[in-house]
Amino acid sequence: MTTVTPGTEFVEMANGVYARLHEGLTNAGIIIGDDSVLIIDSLRVPSFARDLIADIAHLTDKPIQFVIDTHSHWDHAWGNEEFPDSTIIGHANCRTEMLDLEAVDWWRNRVVTSGDPWAEEAKLVRVTPPDITFEDSMQLHFGGHRIDLRYLGRAHTSGDIFIHLPDESLVFTGDVAQDGGVPFMEDGYLRDWVHTDDRLVELDADRFVAGHGPIGERPALEAARDFIAELVDTTALAISDGQDEATTATNVTDRLSERFGGWRGFDRVEDSVAYAYRQMTDA
Ligand SMILES: [Zn+2]
């Protein structure tokens, strides 16, 4: 048996289509084509991308031709520089965010001061945006699979895309929807997210691979939609009721805890509601 990076595992979702799950960290996708390989997300810093490349070498010796960025966030796309010979594909807004020096500095500062094992390495990352971008959709035919890249509106960032394999009833959701996990929201677009989620659940997908956490099935995709909708709806009600930010954050978190209190990352919900409150009262 070959050894892969500790904490990771490959799960074959369809013929030549893999999820590479990384316990507690960021997942990736791998699709093996006739002559080359396509990956979904390059991971947090270059050493994580190099581990991914080494692990893929256990599956195939074909070169990695395409890297698809689900979105601009550091833990998904700051390994891009390790793929100088590959074509990097992402949404136009993903590219814009990666070229936004203020946004990149904000993230770099968060990561560098986190005390995490990758903090030092984050100082040196050369943030490398996609070479090919699109606005609404793009279709690839690769390894016998039809792969639809779909932009359904702003959500977790301004440039989240979904990698949908309709014939496999499978979608890679980045950080927009997880199975039983609260996504990071504090540079998201909360009201838009609700509409994007409504479009996401319309895709033909029985299973999904999120950027974090386990592989999910359709009910979990719908629950992820319900979570954002309930957060936004109850925050909007509190605002129209004249509640202040702190009261809203407490009350909405209490309400959400009834159904979602056991989710990974629920401890960040109160701050997220406060962020949603500021965003929704700013409009
Ligand atoms: Zn993210």
Image (tube, rainbow, N blue to C red):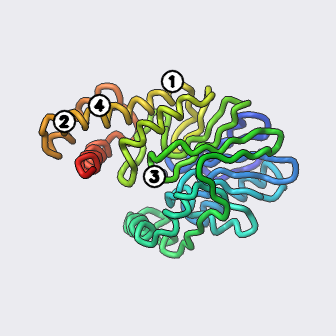
Name the quadrant of the N terminus: top right
Q: Quadrant of residue 66?
A: bottom right
Return the residue found at the far top.
Answer: 219
- Discs 1/4, front: 1
Q: CA distance from mark 1 to mark 4?
A: 18 Å
Lateral position of residue 9 relative to residue 219, left or right: right
Q: Which residue is mark 4?
A: 257
Who is closer to the viewer here, 75 or 104?
104
Sort mark 4 into few (<14), some (14-19) or many (20+) by Cα contacts within 10 Å.
some
Residue 230's tag is none
CB under 8 Å between callouts 1 and 2?
A: no
CB under 8 Å between callouts 1 and 4?
A: no
Residue at the image point whose x is 51% and y is 69% from the top? 99
Sort mark 3 into few (<14), some (14-19) or many (20+) by Cα contacts within 10 Å.
many
**Amino acid at the residue labelled 2:** Ala
Residue at the image point whose x is 42% and y is 44% from the top? 183
Q: CA distance from mark 3 to mark 2?
A: 24 Å
Q: Which residue is mark 2?
A: 238
Q: Along the polypeptide, which appears first: circle 3 or circle 4?
A: 3
- Discs 1/2, front: 2
The secondary element bearing badge 3 is classed as: loop
